[in-house]
Image (spheres, rainbow, N blue to C red):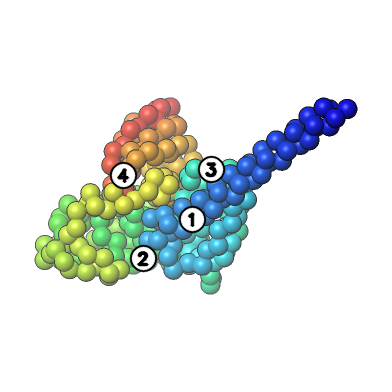
Amino acid sequence: MKRSMYCLALIVTVASLFFINVNLFASETDDRIESSAKQSYVFKTYLMGDDIKIQSMDGAVALTGTVSEESHKSLARETVSSLPGVKSVDNKLEVKGEAPAVNTDAWLITKVKSALLFHRSVSATETEVLAKDGTVTLRGKATSMAQKNLATEYARDVEGVKAVNNEMTVSTAAMKPGKKTMDGKTMGKKVDAVTESVDDASITALVKTTLLFHRSTSAINTTVVTKKGVVELGGKARNAAERNLATKLVSDVYGVKRVVNTMIVQ
């Protein structure tokens, strides 16, 4: 009898220790998820002005608070979804103020600005975007004709854009080392330095969002996996041109070191 009670007590003790360890592990994972999200490149760079609260419980993350624009909602969700240990994301973020009506010029301006923002070969902060009846006008400074042409190409491929007038001036003086951009960042620093500072979850989020903005690529049919800055694209492409464009667009996203495109042409 005593032996049976001793065994039962031992089992209860072991079980209690097991559940305590499981709960401690889950708590540590939740803390790490919340901390990693807040310290991610996306949250510290693009979402720093938003009021976002992150709460994780056993890997189920809830996002609450407010953001300045609609694209920030998906950017926050994609970043958190890509963090290790995250099982699901309940995105309850709300947009402050009144969002531009779909298919209006204001809506189109927001989309073009966002499309340019994540590419390192164009300067979104030095580019003014105007729109009227679907025709987009770009103004500001470009460091080279290649940069100017690339801005035109990226803007033209945004869903809803009918035509692009690029009035940007080409000035090499605009990119002298040490000069500050409109967002306070120093120009002329090596791209490698930026690349090294971007975490994989942020890269995945930026890539998915970039593909979503461009009409020639299909973010819905594309899978994105990032490991140490190397992005692997999977899924289906409508044709070879779409597959090649996806590689080109993703290669120019901040933080991407290399692109491995395994997409299948339908």
Q: CA distance from mark 4 to mark 3?
A: 23 Å
- Mark 3: few/some/many CA within 10 Å (<14, 14-19, 20+): some
Q: Earlier in the sequence, mark 2 or mark 1?
A: 1
Q: CA distance from mark 2 to mark 3?
A: 42 Å
Q: Which residue is mark 2?
A: 131
Q: CA distance from mark 2 to mark 1?
A: 39 Å
Q: Earlier in the sequence, mark 2 or mark 3?
A: 3
> Which circle, 2 or 4, is nearer the viewer?
4
Q: Residue at x 46, y 52 (%)?
A: 36
The residue nearer to you, when weighing 11 against 118, is: 11
Amino acid type for the residue under numbered disc 1: Ser
Q: Residue at x 28, y 49 (%)?
A: 195
The N terminus - image quarter: top right
Regarding mark 4 in the picture, which secondary structure is present there?
A: loop
Amino acid type for the residue under numbered disc 2: Ala
Q: Which residue is mark 1?
A: 35
Q: Which mark is residue 215?
A: none
The C terminus - image quarter: top left
Amino acid type for the residue under numbered disc 4: Val
**Which residue ends up furthest to the front in the rendered image?**
2
Quadrant position of residue 169: bottom left
Q: CA distance from mark 2 to mark 4?
A: 30 Å
Q: Which residue is mark 3?
A: 85
